[in-house]
Amino acid sequence: MQIKKFRLHISTLLLLALIGAAIVIRLILIANHWPNTNSDEATMDLMALHIAYRGEHPIFYYGQDYMGAFEAYLGAAFFRLLGPSVFTLRLSLIFLFTLFLFGMYFLTRLLYDRRVALFTSALLAVGSNDILTHQLIAIGGYPEILCFGAVIFLLVSSLALTSLSAASSSSWRERGRRVLLYALLGLMIGLALWSDLLILPCIAAAGLLLLCFCWRELLRWEGLALAVGSLLGALPLLIYNLHPVPGYNSWQVLLQLHSIGASAVAALHITPWQRLVNFVQISLPIITGANPCHWLADFTQHAVTQASSVCSVTQGLWGSGVLLLWASAVLLALSALWSLWQHIRGSQERTWSVEQRQHVIRQAARLMLLVSALLTVLQFVTSNAAALYPLTSSRYLLCLLLALPALLFPLFRLHRSKEQDSSQEDGHQPKTVSMGHRLRNAFAPALALALLALLATTFLIGTLGTLSEIPGVNVTHTQQVQLDALLLRLGITRIYSEYWTCNRMIFQTRERIICASLNDTLGQGFDRYLPYRKIVRATPHPAYVFPQSSPQAQYFALTHSHDPHYRRLLYVGYVIYQYIS
């Protein structure tokens, strides 16, 4: 008993140390302005600013009919506490990540054991450049769906594992506790659906598990609590869909997003095989922590065949390895369920014991984690965005991280095979074992340990590489601040620019500079918040501020090369055209 308590204390200390290290790494990054902010993130900053200080209540990300504003509302609360800044909004993302890390640890410990839980937490504490970017840049959806997904699976698994004891309990206190848990589960599901519909595979898999083992409770007060919680969490989504723009209800938007780009896919003749190759060699490795071939960042379409053979093989082996782990984990769960079924059929007892039922539920929960990963992949590979842009669209696979413990388990099982074999030789089987059997049992644990070490090293190298980018990011941030300060000194507060400059500049100057976006030929661009466009249009002679290498700068120079009314300035990579009378 004392040993068990000691191990529990050690596990708790290790978990807290891992989470503390993860938070410190992320604080260092955001304190040094990593990753570089952009107009997409500035849009979320502006939403939080308007919620906190103007009383606005947006349902969706500005300029879209999808992806809820949960991040903006959470950021607004942090703004009220600490003041508006990019750093403050990113603190709210670290808060969500911390909840995700706790949720994944307890979920993994519930379904597997402490060793798998601690290793999963260690991997998630670090990560590649791509994984860290999705955790720390506020562009909507990604940090919260990971947090909600972990909590949803944890609640469903816990409710399923305790369903038998709850059914036999006559305590009103226990019933009330479960009603509250169902209400919390519903709230998480509703908020997740409002935040980003990418979480649908996770909710579907978790819902199937709940339906299989808790269906009786769903017909009682617990089911009502689940429904009420779901409606409350998804209330903004429901309000929008009561009177949507014709043809733009949430379901139609989801289908449109999935099918957009069909003509481009047809024109490029992207076959299903090419989709699969892109997925295995680009998208899957990137979202699972491996992008050693940095030339991948230059891919814009299905140009895998243009890559060097070494990079193609490296990425392909990693992606294939992930798929192999998934298949192994599925086979382990199905094999365990089949063995128990055979045991029940062969025994005189035709009912499951409590231990057997718990074993079945645990295996089923593991299987549902893997099913959610499969559904996420199917949703991804059938989309045209993934076919056209396998790199930038890889973020749509982010929910695969929820299945990380299930993918790691086959390696831990393989590593323990030597221990299991030793225990069998101590009395459960004859000591005469073939040489091949001995070699296999000696080689398999070493291979598993090597693969686990490879995973840990890859994730750690990704974090170290990310930290090494800090000096360059600080230079970019300083230049942005200097540009904003110059414009304010010159009295330039109403400008036209391109999309990736506008909202960033508006937020960083706290709306002292107002910007409207122009397209490549200086026509109307994409303005997510239309009041800004109206303000700039109402200005008699706004300035024009473009990155020097942008199409807008080149077009303006071509069409206004002899216009005496504009003074041209070059500063920190930008060209400024100021009107002079």
Image: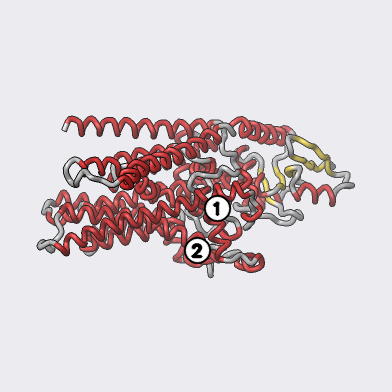
Residue 250 coordinates in the image, percent (x, y): 48, 63
Residue drawn at 74 percent across, 38 percent down: 573
Residue picked out by circle 2: 254
The residues tagged by marks 1 and 2 sit, at their Cα atoms, a distance apart of 26 Å
Q: What amino acid is at disc 2?
A: Leu
Residue picked out by circle 1: 281
Residue drawn at 46 percent across, 40 percent down: 454
* Residue 121 left/right relative to 85: left
Label 2 sits on a secondary structure element that is helix
Q: Point out which mark residue 106 bears.
A: none
Residue drawn at 75 percent across, 50 percent down: 551
Residue 481, above or below 340: above
Q: What amino acid is at disc 1?
A: Gln
Camera-nearest label, 1 or 2: 1
Q: Nearer the viewer, residue 487 or 9?
A: 9
Residue 481, above or below 146: above
* Residue 436 left/right relative to 243: left
Other residues around mark 1 within 10 Å, as few (<14) / some (14–19) / many (≥20):
many
Label 1 sits on a secondary structure element that is helix
Residue 528 coordinates in the image, percent (x, y): 60, 53
Residue 170 coordinates in the image, percent (x, y): 11, 54
Q: Tell me if label 1 and label 2 are in contact, CB under 8 Å.
A: no
Q: Nearer the viewer, residue 130 or 69?
A: 130
Residue 78 shows in the view: no
